[in-house]
Image (cartoon, grey):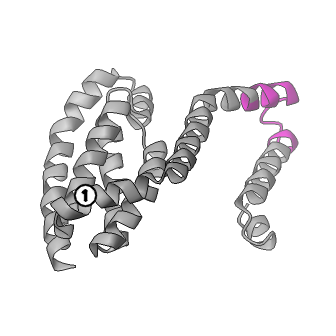
Amino acid sequence: MIAVTLLAGTEVLIGSAAGVITALVLYLVEKKMTFTELLTACYDGVVSMSFVMILTVLAFAVQSVNLDLGLADYVISITEPIMKGAFLPAVVFVVCGIYAYATGCFWDLAAIILPIVIPLAQAMGVDPILASAAVFSGAAFGSNTCLYGDGVIMCSQGCEIKSMDLMFASLPYASIAAIGSVILYLICGFVM
């Protein structure tokens, strides 16, 4: 996959397709699976990811609509007069954490929020990398503590425990990390 990606001029899709084809050939040559079992596994994999694919397409559709509506400019015009830029990373972390906890989503949140947060950070004189980190870490906190978040569901299935039990077991530790993150984002907001 890596070799084909580099040879194709960093086209990850072509590299990924080459990796899948190589894996299919290796499974067949080593007789790990029959051709029918292999196709069934591929079909099941695509079906299991269909919800994620739909969410991703919808997230990019919402992102496109937000750009067309000028949502980033609107948010900048409202936020800039009432908030000091140093608070932006902490506020972004909290908002993204709450949103991701409520929805259980990670990547679609980043696709929707980043095109708003980065221009807002630049307009307020905040380091855009710090603001982006706040988006991703807030989304990671929220989605990994949400009962129906993909990380919690996969981990609970792997450990053969209920999602609810895993959420309640990890929430206190994640909350400690979230409080520390808010404090550090406040410090970084004023220092950077």
Is residue 26 positioned above or below 132 on the image? above
Q: Is residue 98 visible?
A: yes
What amino acid is labelled 1 in the image? Thr
Report the side of 16 relative to 91 (left or right). right
Highlighted magenta segment, given as a residue range: 27-42
- Is residue 38 a member of the stretch shown in magenta? yes
Element type where label 1 sits in the image: helix
Give the quadrant of residue 46.
Answer: top right
Give residue 114's position: percent from left, percent from top: 43, 57
Give residue 66's position: percent from left, percent from top: 49, 48
Q: Nearer the viewer, residue 179 or 130?
A: 130
The residue at the point 74 percent across, 55 percent down is 13
Is residue 75 positioned above or below 5 on the image? above
Q: Nearer the viewer, residue 33 or 165?
A: 165
Q: Is residue 141 visible?
A: no
Q: Nearer the viewer, residue 136 or 77?
A: 77
Give residue 109's position: percent from left, percent from top: 43, 45
Report the side of 36 relative to 144 (left or right). right
Give the quadrant of residue 102.
Answer: top left
Q: Nearer the viewer, residue 23 or 123?
A: 123
Is residue 89 positioned above or below 126 on the image? above
